[in-house]
Amino acid sequence: MPPPPGDKSGKSGGQKKRLAGDSLGPTTGKRPKPNGKNMGSSNQPGQSNQGKDGRQSSNKSRHGGKDAPSNNGPEARRMKNRAARSIPSQRSDSALKDGELDLQSFVNSRGFEVKALDESMRRTRATRSSRAFQQVPYTLRRRAAAHNHKRVPKRLQKRAKKEMAADNTPTVNAKTRKPSSTRDRLRSETVLRLGKLAERRRKQKLLKRGNLDKVTIETRMARPKIRRNTLNDPLVTIKKFKKRQLNKTWLPTHLWHAKRARLTEPNKPLWRFAIPITPTQKVYRPAHRIQWEKGVMAWDTSYMSTIGLCGTPRSVEHVLKGLCLTQAVLWNDKGAKWRSGAVCWSGTLRRKVGAYLRIIAPASIIWNPESVKRTNDSSEPPKQLRRRLFIRIHPSSFLEAFEELNRLVKGQNPRPYIEDLRYEIGSIEVTGPNSTEALLGLLKPYYSKTESKEPHVAKFQSLAGLQDPASLPLGSLLAFSIMDPRLRYPPRRTELPDMTNQEAQLGLLETLSKWHQTEDPVPFALFDRDARFKASQLPTQQSLNRRRGKNAPGVFLEPSETDTAIPIILTASRQSPNAGTWTLMMPWKCILPLWHSLMHFPLSTGGNPGLGGLNEKRQLAFEQGIPWFPGDFPGTDAGMAWELEQRHERKKAWDRMPKGKRIAYEALDLGAGRKGEVGDGWDCGFETLFELPESGTDASQPDEESNVEIEGTEPAKENKSTKLMKHALTHVIHLTKSAFNAYVDPKSDPFPLGAIVTVKIRTLSRGTPAPCARIYRLPTIAHVPVSTQAEVPATEPTHVRDNSKLPSDLRDQWLAKIPGKTNGAKAKPPLKHNSAVDLDVETRKRLLAQELIGPPPSQPNEGNVNGHPFCPDAEDLIGFVTTGSFNLRNGCGEGIGSISAEMAREELGRYKNKDDPAARVCVVRNAGQAVGWVARWDLV
Amino acid sequence: MVRIKERYLLVNILYPSDLGTKPNLPDLVVLNPPTSDSLNPQTLLRALRAQIASLFGDYGSGACAGGGLMVKYLSQATSTFILRISRAHFRLVWAALTTMDRVPVKDGKPCTFRVVHVSGTIRKAEEEAIRRARDMMLAVKDQKAVKGNPALE
């Protein structure tokens, strides 16, 4: 019978209760000491006189372990953890003195508790509960690192190996692995058979070589054919994987990207290429930081198409004018620089369709400079001087441009010719503040002697310290030859001038200001087919390694005769300030070695360049506020194809959702008795906006069959294009900003039906536009003329709604939503009406009476939508958002969209004063939502 | 993160019936005397389970069956213990503790179980226990502060 703990007699009972194997404060993984004095005695001097064995016990004593296994197995580890996690505690008599309550003992027992808990916390922290592969930083994590110790960094490999052994982690040896599925078995059998075949072939070859005499004639490899005026055969990047490239082309860096990025699905290539969509690692915020803060992001943009055009200057000029390069600036003295090849032009190509011009795509055009000595091929008559130029265009509209060029070329005499250089010339795009530095470190000029030095080399090298390629003059272009980047692998950090130094800054500024002054361009080697071919004959990695082996360690290789010069053209684009991009064009086969070097380049700000995919391209364009081709150009053929594909995807995703979870577009309550989404929720329905005739088949849902066909042969592609041609979206016409401005004068011609213009939309208060969001203008005033009405031209149509249930002051409600000083007063009154806090009793009574005898309380979405004003009616719909998201750069919701050109002109005409708060204000409502947000649009 | 969600209850055993019996000692000391040594984790768990079963029936006993309920720390000298229970059911345990009025040993003294802290990790429960023990030490040393300390009242 144990007496109450406070009693003296409790002591004896408590003493005998001690359990076997009591463990006390096991500080390390060692076996707990049987005699546990270590903790209490050191902590509690006051208790030492009565500190007998067994006064202190651990809660976990029952696990204390008879005899822990000496090996490092899981059982031992578990024991260790258990020991580390147990907290020592004291028996009741340590808080008593001779069985009586005592102040000092009370304090001492508390002190022991504090020490014990504190120690326990420290011990559990030290006990390793994470594995080696979990400690690897985010960017160094690798797939299956838990099962393969070689996938963690070197310093952790030993530990990982030990842990794996301790944990009995199952590992797989690739050599002894049994195939798990039928496909695996087939694959392994094929590998075996191919191996045998290769072995036999190798033996036969050896036999043959033994019989033959020494090779006396050296033949050069066949130069790839470039046909004129027709398409070229796609290139098979790696012969071994020929079968995988039947319906698409691999980029030169395909294998590299396939391991590090998500590519397009195998049977769903994009624009007939396997294009990296996004890196495997999370990159949204890093991409933003790279663009605006520090670092480099690079894309392999070899999918961009290059078309060569060659002919007499006059015929070439006519062809280009046929592509609507009719600006006088290009063909008069101002354009002489461009025509001489010193400057690169970027703009939009258009073609005539009926009475209007249809945009093909944005493109850039580079002329090959005339050779000063006028030494042409002997086959060419000397007076028939020919000019060459490259047109670099997006692959989605390549075919359209190529066909148009072919048509234009045929009408010329003497007839120029075009070449499809898609698989001849590849390109890399580099952006970020450190991009110039990386290029300076990688692109080493091939000709180092001063007499043979190319003029652009010095210009390029004077750019050291340049942060932003956009600070170069418009259309800057450099062309020279570089040496094989593998000769200087691994790349080393570039020596940069100290940019805090005034002189260095001035020097750079001077370089930039004198950029176009020293001009005597020589022909670019990249235009020369032989130079391109020679550059493609790169020495093998083996031979380079052999040469490197002869050198001392860390010494770069010197270019020998076998190393050919690689011709490049480097252009700086500045679509938006502070965010320029370098575009490096070089022979297709030279992309890979440079890419490897680029990805390993040590930047001065730390780290290496990052890789980007298509999504990052779109993201950065969005952050810069520029439209991305083709997604933001629904009025072009390529943009229409993109939009239809997106519609199909969104529809599919919507269909896949269970009925209860997806947005019921048909039941959307827009308030004021309006039910259902305007158009389809997954569409940017420009055809409904203009009420264009729906003709032909339903092209918005291409069936699987046609999808497969598209990638196949040429006739199938025509099928697709004819099918698309029938869609109502074909009647939507995209206007460039300059084309729109030509129309802006109200007296000018009316816009063609279906004309749209691209705008940037920024929300003024809250809200984030998403793709497919609807753009409304503010409802026009129907009844009373306001002061601004005087400025409105008489021709302006007034919208009088007879049957609309929308409130008459809807416009003012929306204008009140614009934050700012001027609208603060407007926003207040409705609020004050609701809050009857500072009113006296009489008024409150009156208000209550009014409320009671007034109309019944409103239904949901009757007076407003959760406190937001109603969206304007469908007749005020002016356009759709094609890209929308939160812009990390500006810290607000933004979107790129297209609006009806007619309505845009009306809106611009209504507000003569540019600073009018209501000018260019619109309401953006996401598809499937009833709440709209006030925003402002700007032409881009 | 996907893991088993748990709650840690820090509980004090108080003896309010002893108050006033020892005029020469501060109330705080009288209220927090050590608990009988015969209270060990096993007896405590058994009593708790029985109480939960009587209060919540089969549902309750199922909720704290197996390894669901666990004593992480029990100090008889300071009448403090830490319990671990799954997050979904910690209220059952709390309710059972509230309704228990005796130390669950033979002829147990009347007492009150006071849940002083609930946390998601044992670390926070330990930190709270340390804080309370420190406060108590200080308060006892500075006897005047006992009455005015709201944390201990």
Image (cartoon, rainbow, N blue to C red):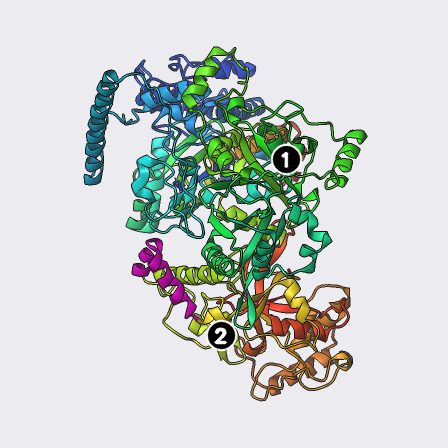
Q: Residue at x 52, y 75 (%)?
A: A690
Residues at discs 2 and 1 in contact (Cβ within 8 Å): no
Say above or below: A246 vs B10: below
**Residue A38 seen from this side:** yes
Q: Residue at x 45, y 65 (%)?
A: A682
Q: Is residue A685 left or right of residue A343?
A: left
Question: How far from the left and from the top, in percent, is residue A34?
Answer: 38, 13
Q: What is the chain letter for disc 2?
A: A
Question: How far from the left and from the top, in percent, is residue A676?
Answer: 46, 75
**Residue A678 seen from this side:** no
Q: Please report whichever mark, 2 or 1, sits nearer to the chain's N-terminal start.
A: 1
Which of A876 and A752 lies nearest the eye of the viewer? A752
Question: How far from the left and from the top, in percent, is residue A157?
Answer: 41, 20
Q: How many marks?
A: 2
Please state which amino acid type lies under the numbered disc 2: Thr
What residue did someone put label 2 on? Answer: A688
Which of A932 and A181 lies nearest the eye of the viewer? A181
The boundaries of the magenta stretch are A704-727
Residue A719 falls within the magenta-colored stretch? yes
Question: How far from the left and from the top, in percent, is residue B7?
Answer: 44, 41
Q: Mark 2 and mark 1: span between their CA atoms?
A: 47 Å
Say above or below: A195 vs A637: above
Please state which amino acid type lies under the numbered disc 1: Thr
Q: Quadrant of residue A66?
A: top left
